[in-house]
Each structure stands twice: as C-alpha cells, then as structure tokens.
Image (cartoon, grey):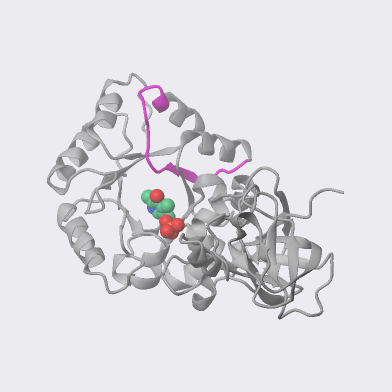
Amino acid sequence: MSRATSATIHLGALRHNLRRLRELAPGAKLMAVVKADGYGHGLERVARALGEADAFGVACIADGQRLRAAGVTRRIVVLSGIDEPADIAEMHRLDLDSAIHHDAQIDWLAADRDTRPLRVWLKLDSGMHRLGFAPSQARDAYARLRALPNVDPAIGLMTHFANSDVFDDPQTAAQLRVFEDAFDGVPGERALSNSAAVLGWPAARGQWIRPGGLLYGISVVEGRSGADDGFRPAMTLSSKLVAINRVARGETVGYAGAWTCPEDMPVGVAQIGYGDGYPRSAAAGTPVLVGGVRAPIVGRVSMDLITIDLRGVPAARIGDRVVLWGEGLPVEEVAAHAGTIGYELTCGMTRRVRFLEDER
Ligand SMILES: *Cc1c(COP(=O)(O)O)cnc(C)c1O
C-alpha cells in the first residue's frame, strides 16, 4: 500500500475564494498570484480552477511557460520580469508581461532588435526596498519606457506593501502616498494590493488587485485565518494513525526525549513528518485532528512520523484519518505553532506527498 499522506486540493474552494475577493474589491481586475507552484497547490491545477482570473502573476518565465503549455490564454505577468537580455525573446514567444524594476532591464529593451511591443509593468519601490525604482527615478523610468517603440504604451504601474497585514501600521499609508506622489498624473493601470491589503486597505485598490494567499484561503493577518473573512482552505493535508501505544507515566516520547508523559496515556503515531513537509519546528501542543477531534502533538516531529497525545480521543483507532491542516484546522494556526506563516507550509510539500483534488 502507498503511504497515506496526501494533500487534497479543493477546486471549489479556489473558485469560491476568487469570487470572495471580487466581492471585497468590486470592479477591480484580479491578477491571481500563482508563484511557487500556486503556493504549493499545483500551478496548472490552480490555473484551471481560477480560469476566471483576469491575469496570473508568476515569479519566473518557466512558470509562464507551464501555464501556456496548460492552455492558459489570459495575461501572465512575470513579477520580477526579464533577468537577462535573452529573456525578451522568450517573453514574446510566450506572450508574457514583464515587470520592470531596474534600469538594466530598460537598457536591455532599448538594445533589443525585436520591434514587437512588450507589455510591461513599471514597479516602484515605495518603501519595501526589495524590487523597484526609487520614487525619485520612477518618472524618468516611465519616460524611458514610453519612448521605446518595442514597449506597449499601456504601461501598468505597481508597487508592493511590506506590512499591509498589520492594519494599524502607518507604513502602508506612507507607501500608498509615495506611490500616488511618484505617479501623480502618470497614466496607466495601477496594481498595489496583495491579499492583506485587499482586506485592510481599501484605499489601495487601483484598477487591479494582486492577491495570492487568500485565493488559497490563507491569511497572513496575525491571529486570523482566511475563514474569519469568508475564505475556504484550498488544501487539506491528511494522513492516518498507524499505531496507538500505551506509554507509562514518566516515559519520554520521540527523539531527545523532548516530551515526558505526565501519566499513563495513549500516544498515537501518524504517518507524516518533515520528510513530507510537515514542519519540524511544530512544537508540542500543535493541534491535529484525529477522526475530526482536536489533539495536540507531543515530542519532536520526525522525518516520517509524528506522535499525538490521544488522551482526549478515547475512540481513536488505528487507521483513523489525521488532518494536519485544512478543513476544520486552519493552516494559519498550525503555522503559528511552528513560528512561520501558512504560505510556507503549503509551499513546502515534498514530492512524496500524493496530491488529490476534489470539487469541494
Ligand atoms: C507574492 C506577491 C503577491 C501576493 O501576495 P499575497 O500576500 O500572497 O497576497 C503580490 N504581489 C507580489 C509582487 C508578490 O510577490
């Protein structure tokens, strides 16, 4: 028998989440961010479910290639754009949009012999200091692009927020002002809002929103899960119990004896570990669902297995389904126990995890 560990992707949840985002940002076009293999949900599968998106945002040309090969005809925006001159031909071949965040990229375009117009998005660094032109250089960059015959004159304008998940953080309002000042009077469709900004910063909605996480039902707002705002988890990671052991009071469980039984108790063993992408950093107390009932893990996460305190689940039996996150257990909550965010967990599934899909 194959290993029980599987990630089920809920296509209905993906579609629901897209509709929910449209409800929250009426009138805005939606660029569905599907980088990192659709946040670990499977790029082609996600694109198929989100066929109603107005565009897709990817991290690299290779992802654009996969989407085109899968028959996606919508606009596809490569969020960091061309990395070298040869990428321009590839962008044309695949009909991709390129973000432009650096002078070097404009130089490559200026030197390119292909006269076909490339669609571009000018990226401003409004304060995150990762990719983008400084505010003082943004107009100049726009003018340079606009003067190039091989650049489509409908240049999009974008920036990215560093702290939009903290709704009372003044940084987002400050970044928004920097963006508005830098592009005051500059024509072009604006795209600013990641998922958290769609929730918390309605003023930042331009013509486009650019969410990733919420499409998968995942929130990065601390203490909240996507469900709190009407989203549904798009991945359920599950496995099963392969052993239930009675362990005596005072005995320790797992590597390094990191957990000591306070009494004689049942300890369940489930077939999932960091070799599957379940985080080793998940501390004792991280919840799982055993047959639908919450129970905390105890001891260290191993490569293939975890151990579970079954004192609260007396009916547990070998073979019971164990849910690590998803329906009934937000990945955001598990991530908080592991000192990370939900995105990192769904992105981290390894190749031995079986991917299934359903219409839920
Ligand atoms: C990842 C990313 C997004 C989406 O962010 P979420 O928090 O997942 O909504 C949007 N824009 C850019 C440039 C990104 O890198």
Q: Nearer the viewer, residue 15 or 350?
A: 350
When the figure is inspected, residue 290 is found, relative to residue 211, above or below; the finding is below
Tell me where the magenta segment starts and ends, as one range.
71-88
Query: What is the residue that sits farthest to the right in this orientation?
Result: 1
Instruction: Decide if residue 256 is on the left or right side of residue 120.
Output: right
Residue 96 is covered by the magenta coloring? no
* Residue 84 seen in the current view: yes
Quadrant field for ligand 1: bottom left
Q: Quarter holding the C terminus?
A: bottom right
- Image quarter of residue 290: bottom right
Magenta-highlighted stretch: main secondary structure? Answer: loop
Residue 306 is situated, as x and y percent measured from the top left of the image, at: 68, 59
- Kindly identify the residue that appears in the image at 32 percent across and 44 percent down: 154
Q: Residue furthest front?
A: 250
For residue 211, say whether it is visible: no
Frontmost residue, 123 versus 278? 278
Which percent across, then down, holds residue 91? 44, 31
Q: Quadrant of residue 318?
A: bottom right
Between 294 and 193, the one lying in front of the other is 294
User: Could you say where residue 1 lies in the image, as x and y percent from the top left?
Assistant: 87, 49
Residue under the point 32% across and 73% down:
167
Relative horizontal placement of residue 357, taking residue 335 as reference (left or right)? right
Check residue 76 for magenta coloring: yes
In the image, residue 303 above or below residue 261: above
The mark tally for this picture is: 0
Q: Residue 309: percent from the left, percent from the top?
A: 68, 72
Q: Is residue 220 above or below residue 48?
A: below
Residue 133 occupies quadrant: top left
